[in-house]
Image (tube, grey):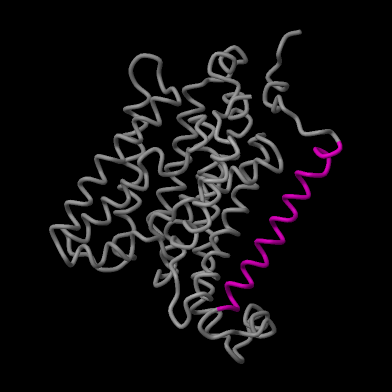
Amino acid sequence: MPVTLEAATKPAHHPPPHRAAWARPALLLGLLVALAAAVFASLAIGTKAVPMADVLAALGGSDAGDAVVVRELRMPRTLLGLLVGLALGVAGAVAQDITRNPLGDPGLLGISAGGAFAVAASIGLLGLTGPLEYVWFGFLGAALAGALAYLVGGTGRGGSTPAKLALAGAAVTFLLDGFTSALVLLNVRTLDQYRYWAVGSLAGRDGEVGLLLLPFVAAGLLLALAISSRLNALALGDDVATSLGTRVGLTRGLGALAVILLTGAAVAAAGPITFVGLVVPHAVRAFIGPDARWLIPCSGLAGGTLVLAADVVGRMVARPGELEVGVVTALVGAPFLIALVKRGKLKEHSR
């Protein structure tokens, strides 16, 4: 029986029919509810607890009570965390599909390392001092590093194979990490400023940063959703995808572009927040299977929920100070990664 593109874009290992009928919509609905809860928690919980009635009143336009705290301080931080989480969750799902690598995350293509190097250079060489000043350097560095990794991994014999992309990304990462280390170790002022950015944080970020990067995140999300069916075909293997009419090189290139846009914006806004892009797609895939048409939007919602929840936890456990969101996600992500290794779940994504 000939294989059709429609059949190919559906995962070969379907969940049981009784589960497939309700599991995906149920998870999508559950993630929407969880994300809404995380948003309200982010607005209400902090050094000063704000009653939920005051949060709702502030959102409704009232100036009574702690409306200023909610609208002026926590709303920009919450929206930035939502933007970063959405971007990292979707970028991780796409990165794992285009590289067919279970360890694929937004940093796999050297994007985080590129953003880190550009920020360190802007601080050490240009004397910039605030996130709003070096946000574009972070985005540009991330984008150029991702493009370089894709250019190196996508040329030569065989084109852009998953293994070549992963190796090229690792090479770019090691190279840029070396330059970054040299910059921060040779200049104490650079080291002081860079280390607060590099840990991954939403604290102290101006709300304008999110507005500046919103168009790039929106473009990356739309592009990822647009190629989700092609990613399903790509996961069957390059030869099968080609026989089905999928342009493998173009699909992988568009996927890499989506990852660069999303990760570059997230890194520029909040620094390299680790494990979100790695952990979230694996967790979502365990419930709904590998179908990218569901995996991508659900990973975005789960990523937003995880980043906001981690930010809230960081505010609660170290009062009156706080743990940075990058520290909390790493503490959550490392045990999850160990569990994946122990259970033998890290396999190449092919169907």
Residue 183 coordinates in the image, percent (x, y): 17, 54
Q: Nearer the viewer, residue 314 or 305?
A: 314
Residue at 44 percent across and 70 percent down: it is 323
Q: Quadrant of residue 268?
A: bottom left
Span colored in magenta = 18-45
Residue 294 coordinates in the image, percent (x, y): 68, 40
Residue 19 highlighted magenta (yes or no): yes
Q: Is residue 19 left or right of residue 140?
A: right
Q: Nearer the viewer, residue 270 or 251?
A: 270
Instruction: Name the image quarter holding the C terminus.
Output: top right
Q: What is the tally of numbered marks visible in this picture? A: 0
Q: Is residue 31 above or below residue 202?
A: above
Residue 132 coordinates in the image, percent (x, y): 34, 65
Q: Quadrant of residue 108?
A: top left
Residue 191 coordinates in the image, percent (x, y): 22, 63
Q: Is residue 307 above or below residue 87?
A: below
Residue at 34 percent across and 33 percent down: it is 149
Q: Main secondary structure of the magenta part?
A: helix
Q: Is residue 314 above or below residue 6?
A: below
Residue most toward the front?
Answer: 342
Q: Quadrant of residue 66?
A: bottom right
Residue at 54 percent across and 68 percent down: it is 78
Q: Is residue 86 left or right of residue 169?
A: right
Instruction: Name the image quarter holding the N terminus.
Output: top right
